[in-house]
Amino acid sequence: MNLNLVSPPEPRAQSEERYAARLSPLDASFLDVEGPTAHMHVGWAAEFLPPSDRPSPGYPELRSHIESRLGRAPRYRQRLAELPLGLEDPVWIDDDGFDADEHIHRAPWPDMAVAADAVFSRPLARDRSPWELWIGEQLRGGRLGIVGKVHHCMVDGLAAWDLAGLLLDPTPDSVPQERDRWRARPAPSALEMLAAGLHDRATHGLNLVTRLLRTSRSPTRLVGASAAALRGSRALARAALPPASPTPLNQPLTSERRLVRIRRAISDLQMVKERHRVSLNDVLLAVCAGAMRDLMRARGEEPTALKTMVPASVRRSDRTGELGNQVSAVFVDLPCDEPSPVHRLHRLHRLMGKRKQAGDHHVVREAIDALSYVPRPLRQAGVRLAAASRLAFNLTVSNIPGPGVPLYMRGCRLEAAYPVVPIPERHGLSIGMTTIEGHACFGVYVDPGVVPDAGDLDEGLHRAIDELLAR
């Protein structure tokens, strides 16, 4: 986990000197698919143990602590600005009216579960920096709770931990902060933004023409490009075809959300991993397949395979502090129709191995990057059409690496953090897992109007792990 957030990258063009960065096509797509019932935020609900050698910090102290850390992450004091005529994707500009009280709140709910459900059931405002932190200072057992959410256009699941990095230290004693000298840069005018958008659009067009000319003039490049295109088309076909079969999970959403929190010793999952010589991600997928199978059977449904999107990080190790989305995806059928827990695990191990060997996640990422050559209005129409058409997948399962060391906030030790993986329209459920202090923390994020029995997945996930341990 990166505790020292870096400044945004340098502007891409001289005409953008007042901008922090422009949204990538993938970042912008999370704005385009958001609606009243599809909230595109990532997040987490964290619990802290009270300090043993000092009084627990109250809300004023915690709020001051968080505000003092904002200098580590300039993006969290920026807002989105749309370009005139929607010519290009929005850009980040400094928010000259930034007010920490619009983002840091005292949670009025005494229970962590109630707080998480209330916070995640509301979309983030677009007229300011899209993030919020809600602090519960007096929970059960003297614990402290923090519910945080950030719009997916700003961060992916891994980068969402960087917001937690504003709060946390590797020792109980807080690291002193340098004086915050942040001042908002003047907002660019509409004419400046329009000129920057035209410049970027012309640059994208020139780059495309240059690449095509270089390829056409070299037989070796032409053959290589043809082979790469063939491999890419096969990988994209595997991702898109066949479309996912509609299930009771895939119904129109309401605006309500529920976060089911499950905690299990990570050593149990690692034991299964070592016994069967598979990856931890394979174990996670097999456990989710078992839990979903149990849910279907409890409903009286015939268990069927569920086409599952598995996010894959393509973030380079030297760019861990950067915001924005650095992810791709692999699509795999979750074998909920297989009665044997071991067979489910090994089937998933083989399928994921084939996907990785074929480089499916790289191909999907390249296809996403290629969207930068498409004008934004056409991309928006395509994204919205895809969201309203047949399903590409049934659910999302994401393994989000957590911190490998103990972490503290004003002397309070981080005990658990349950991730939130967003659910797009007609997707009633997602499952995320992160590791905190020797425990796997599962966040089952649902629309209770679509999946009213999601609480059964608590027992189902534990049972699926127990079945694999017993074998």
Image (cartoon, rainbow, N blue to C red):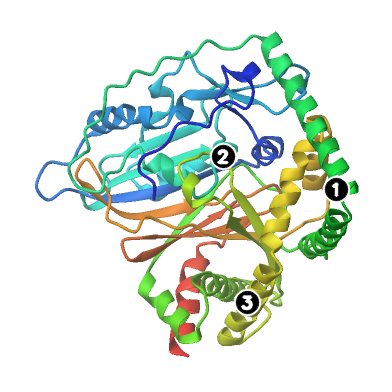
Which mark, by number, is residue 324? 2
Q: Residue at x 49, y 45 (%)?
A: 319
Three-letter residue code for mark 3: Leu
Name which of mark 1 and mark 2 comes first in the sequence: 1
Name which of mark 3 and mark 1 comes first in the sequence: 1
Which residue occupies the foreground of this view, 292 or 23?
A: 23
Which residue occupies the foreground of this view, 359 or 390?
A: 359
Which mark, by number, is residue 348? 3
Q: Is 113 on the left or on the right of 415, as rendered?
A: right
For disc 1, the marked residue is 215
Mark nearest the camera among 1 and 2 is 1
Name which of mark 2 and mark 3 comes first in the sequence: 2
Residue 256, placed above or below residue 266: above
Which mark, by number, is residue 38? none
Q: CA distance from mark 2 to mark 3?
A: 30 Å
Q: CA distance from mark 1 to mark 2?
A: 31 Å
Where residue 56 sits in the image (x, y, percent)? 17, 41
